[in-house]
Image (cartoon, grey):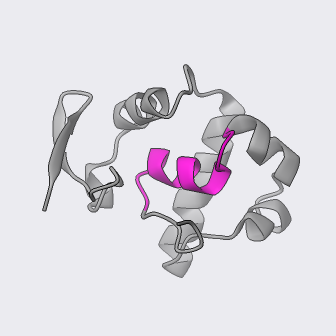
Amino acid sequence: MPTKTIAGVTVDVTEEGYLTNRAQWTKDIALEIAHEEGLNELSPDHWKVIEFLQKDYAERGALPSIRRINAVGGIPTKDLYSLFPGGPLKKAARIAGLPKPTSCV
């Protein structure tokens, strides 16, 4: 299994850079991954999405769809695309330390 040093910590990742061990995730790691994804900072709205993804994943064992993030998380789809341009679910999941969405190629 590949490893990568992120924020000074060696973590287990997939070939695409998604963490494989959620217990290794920290906010510092999230910030560095966000930077890799082209986001210079994470606003409170970014954290709202990240925290919803983590909570929903922990409860259901699967990543929520964009529709579920909108309906259950109360985060408008337009905002997701604005916060995480170029693939909101894929980027947000990676930053949140969760697996790559199965809906993404």
- How many numbered badges does the structure rendering display? 0
Left or right of residue 95: residue 55: right
Name the residue rendered at 57%, 48% in the picture.
Answer: 92
Q: Residue 49: where, in percent of width, then height? A: 66, 48
Range shown magenta: 84-98
Please say if 14 is above or below 36.
below
The residue positioned farthest toward the top in the image shown: 40
Name the residue rendered at 46%, 63% in the picture.
Answer: 100
* Front position in the image: 102 or 68: 102
Left or right of residue 56: residue 11: left
Q: Residue 2: where, in percent of width, then height? A: 15, 55
| Residue 55 highlighted magenta (yes or no) | no
The residue positioned farthest toward the front in the image shown: 105
Left or right of residue 100: residue 69: right
Q: Residue 53: where, in percent of width, then height? A: 59, 59
Please say if 69 is above or below 44.
below
Q: Residue 80: where, in percent of width, then height? A: 75, 46
Asked if residue 57 can be seen in this view, the reply is yes
* Front position in the image: 48 or 94: 94
Name the residue rendered at 52%, 76% in the picture.
Answer: 62
Quadrant location of the N terminus in the rendered image:
bottom left
Left or right of residue 64: residue 22: left
Name the residue rendered at 46%, 26% in the picture.
Answer: 35
Please say if 47 is above or below 90.
above
Asked if residue 76 can be seen in this view, the reply is no
